[in-house]
Image: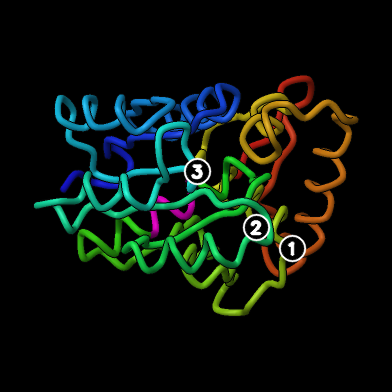
Amino acid sequence: MSTPDAATVLVVDDEPNVRDLLSATLRLSGFNVHTVGDSAAALIVAGAYPPDAMVLNAVLPDGDGFALARRLRNGHDNVPVLFLAARDSVAERIAGLTAGGDDYVTKPFSPEEIVLRLRTILRRASGRNDGHVTYADLTLDEDAHEVRRAGRIVELSPTEFNLLRYLMVNAEKVVSKTQILDRVWNYDYDGDSRIVESYISYLRKKIDSQGRRLIHTIRGIGYTPR
């Protein structure tokens, strides 16, 4: 089993925009990615490039993702599967879990959420359960979705959590507003880019109020934890 950040992921979805979005996001997160649009192509690609994890749409043009999962996992039961299900489709969720799915996400979804969930199920499959990102006296627990500074819990919204994680995994680097929008918000986000400034401000009030300042602005470039 590869480490989570070097794992090979097979994405099977009949929507080209979903495939493109996941491919770009997962590659930027360090994964090796193969994408296809139906079950027949998935079987061919999986045979040539055995995946460490799979992201499967529940409904495909030539069958369903649940039957495909069973075929792909034949002899490889430890390969984790994340299903993409239609919003509010209880039947699809139950079918996914019955088919041996490790997790499911409903559409529409945040690509960053897919990355976090894949890392979690890959750690489970490989026996690694750390799930922690640490910088200075700040610790982020992906599995528990919990942040602590100097041992004290810091309450964050889901977006604040994702933003903080992105800053922490890029510690000592400077990340631009565009990079943050691409990674924390959707790639097709077309709203006001000042939303980044607002959430940086929210984080500073919650994080930097409990110790030395960690989140710095590099004027005209972006942000960095230092």
Name the residue: 55% across, 78% down. Answer: 151
Q: CA distance from mark 2 to mark 1?
A: 6 Å
Q: Does residue 159 belong to the magenta stretch?
A: no
Q: From this viewpoint, is residue 162 visible?
A: yes
- Report the span colored magenta: 115-120
Residue where numbered disc 3 is placed? 59
Q: Nearer the viewer, residue 218 or 167?
A: 167
- Where residue 119 appears, as percent x and y from the top left, is 39, 52
Mark 2: amino acid:
Phe
Q: Disc 3 and disc 2: Cα gap in Å?
A: 31 Å
CB within 8 Å, label 3 to label 2: no
Report the disc number at residue 157: 1
Vertical placement of residue 218 versus 76, above or below: above
Q: Amino acid at mark 1?
A: Ser
- Residue 68 or 9: which is nearer the viewer? 68
Identify which residue is drawn at 60% across, 44% down. 225
* Secondary structure at numbered mark 3: strand
- Quarter where residue 211 is shown: bottom right
Q: Nearer the viewer, mark 3 or mark 2?
A: 3
Image coordinates of residue 198 in percent, x first then y, are 87, 45
Farthest residue in the front direction?
62
**Which element is circle 2 on?**
helix
Q: Name the residue rendered at 65%, 57% in the picture.
A: 161
Q: Within the image, what quadrant is residue 125 found in?
A: bottom left
Q: Which residue is denoted by mark 2 in the rendering?
A: 161
Instruction: Answer above or below: position of 3 versus 193.
Output: below
Q: Would residue 137 appear left or right of 186 to someone viewing this image? A: left
| SS assignment at label 1 | loop
Q: Label 1: few (<14), some or many (≥20) within 10 Å?
A: few
* Of pointers 3 and 2, the one earlier in the residue sequence: 3
Residues packed near mark 3 inside 10 Å, few (<14), some (14 to 19) or many (20 plus): some
Within 10 Å of the Cα at label 2, are there few (<14), some (14-19), or many (20+) other Cα atoms? many
